Image (cartoon, rainbow, N blue to C red):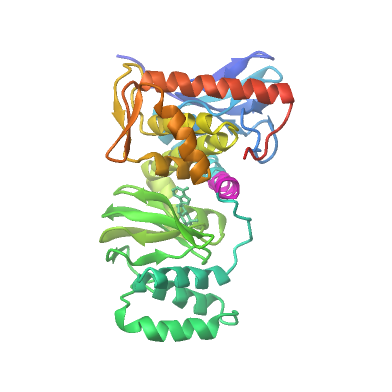
């Protein structure tokens, strides 16, 4: 019988590469005991808080390891270093033995997500980043009234009046609420006691920019996470049973970074701050799950950001398809066929290209033999070929960037 894996100590000599960006075998992450490590990333828009030089108590490699994806950073020992290596499967041991480090990891993840999320909206949607503005609650209400989603609109107006009683649009919000009241069925306008809550389809659980002190675990049904940006609804994710959301406001004492809406009738477990702190020690598997979810989101956001740096629209589209395959863990090795559940238009939107320019670039891709469109879905007959193309475009751009010596901020 093999020994059960433990947290182990490892040493690296000055100059050694500990992890390498793009490498697939991310099974361990590291916490520094002594010495210094330098982190480097291909995508320069993602600055790490606290800089690139890490010291004792800092950790690295967690996103890739916990999300089971390829590494998104390179770490090199600047001095001789001693590290604690944590295998993914032993993460619960870390939570049990060193709760503060586990909390530090998820808190850092939460901040990182907020940062990446905002950066991405800025780059792809040309959306100027404003601090959390309570007037936005009113704008959310206005958007959903126009969509005839009265329960959602009513909820947003209600929160607007509650949190911005002196706001610019208070009178208008009151008038709108009066008008839509007969058609609206909002639930839990005020926080309620109780461990679980049930939300009917198309009701709002919380609205972006409002304060929030609870996180939710989906027990039944599904929830969509959305934002209203430039008067359009942007879908960030559809979450399923077992998924967790609303952790960012709870961990950072900040307003909600996005809205949560019942996508189907759903039952949610509600966790407040006091319960959360108790759960950290009594339910390590929940914290492990939260870390994994955050790691997956961060990994994807990082890849999307790296995508926006590609100057050539064809490169961006190839790369966009490849990161989707990676996200869905489609096996590339066997070179089999794959049908995406989206078409060219959605792909163009996802990578943040202007429609016309993006569709023209997609035409170019269609001239290659292994990609076509069927029933408005993109069909790839050989995923290995797609990977090859995407990687070679990435490489060309990397060389080009290095040649110009630019730290590209915006590649439009
Ligand atoms: P919070 O900011 O409290 O409220 C909105 C929640 O949506 C946020 O916590 C996360 O749980 C979740 N969320 C935010 N951005 C994303 C994203 N890009 N993908 C998936 N979930 C997200």
Residue 270 to residue 178: above or below: above
Q: Residue at x 65, y 40 (%)?
A: 410
| Image quadrant in which you'd find residue 116 | top right
The answer to which quarter of the image holds residue 43 is top right
Specify whether 166 is left or right of 280. right
In the figure, is residue 300 to the left or right of 81? left
Counting from the top left corner in percent of width and height, residue 152 is at 38, 70
Q: Main secondary structure of the magenta part?
A: helix
Percent across and percent down for residue 57 are: 62, 34
Q: Which residues are magenta?
A: 110-124
Comparing 96 with 62, the one in front is 62
Q: Relative to residue 144, is residue 347 depicted above or below? A: above
Q: Residue at x 57, y 72 (%)?
A: 135
- Residue 257 within the segment the image draws in magenta: no
**Residue 396 seen in the current view:** yes
Q: Is residue 148 above or below residue 64?
A: below
Foreground: 216 or 206? 206
Residue lying at 32% horizontally and 53% vertically, measured from the top left: 218
């Amino acid at each position: 019988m093999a020994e059960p894996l433990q947290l182990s100590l490892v040493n690296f000599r000055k100059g050694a590469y500990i992890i390498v960006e793009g490498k697939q075998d991310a099974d361990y992450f590291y916490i520094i005991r002594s010495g210094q490590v330098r982190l480097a990333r291909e995508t320069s828009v993602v600055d790490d808080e606290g800089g690139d030089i890490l010291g004792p108590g800092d950790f690295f490699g967690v996103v890739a390891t916990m999300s089971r994806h390829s590494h998104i950073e390179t770490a090199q020992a600047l001095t001789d270093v001693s590290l604690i290596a944590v295998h993914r499967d032993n993460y619960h041991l870390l939570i049990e033995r060193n709760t503060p480090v586990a909390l530090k990891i998820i808190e850092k993840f939460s901040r990182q997500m907020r940062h990446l999320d905002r950066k991405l909206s800025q780059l792809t949607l040309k959306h100027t980043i404003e601090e959390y503005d309570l007037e936005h609650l009113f704008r959310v209400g206005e958007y959903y009234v126009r969509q005839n989603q009265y329960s959602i609109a009513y909820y947003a107006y209600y929160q607007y009046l509650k949190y911005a009683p002196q706001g610019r649009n208070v009178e208008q919000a009151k008038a709108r609420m009066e008008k839509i009241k007969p058609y609206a069925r909002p639930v839990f306008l005020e926080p309620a006691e109780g461990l679980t809550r049930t939300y009917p389809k198309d009701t709002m659980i919380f609205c972006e920019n409002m304060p929030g002190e609870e996180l939710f675990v989906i027990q039944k049904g599904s929830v969509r996470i959305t934002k209203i940006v430039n008067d359009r609804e942007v879908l960030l994710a559809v979450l399923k049973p077992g998924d967790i959301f609303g952790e960012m406001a709870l961990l950072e004492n900040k307003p909600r970074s996005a809205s949560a809406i019942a996508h189907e009738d759903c039952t949610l477990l509600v966790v407040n701050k006091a319960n959360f702190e108790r759960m950290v020690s009594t339910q390590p598997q929940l914290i492990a799950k939260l870390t994994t979810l955050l790691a997956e989101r961060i990994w994807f956001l990082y890849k999307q950001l790296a995508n926006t740096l590609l100057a050539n629209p064809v490169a961006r589209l190839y790369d966009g398809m490849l990161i989707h395959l990676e996200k869905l863990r489609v096996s590339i090795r066997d070179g089999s066929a794959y049908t995406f559940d989206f078409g060219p238009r959605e792909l163009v939107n996802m990578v943040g290209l202007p429609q016309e320019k993006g569709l023209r670039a997609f035409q170019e891709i269609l001239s290659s033999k292994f990609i076509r469109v069927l029933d408005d879905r993109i069909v790839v007959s050989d995923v290995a070929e797609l990977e090859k193309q995407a990687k070679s475009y990435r490489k060309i751009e990397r060389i080009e960037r290095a040649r110009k010596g630019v730290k590209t901020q915006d590649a439009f």
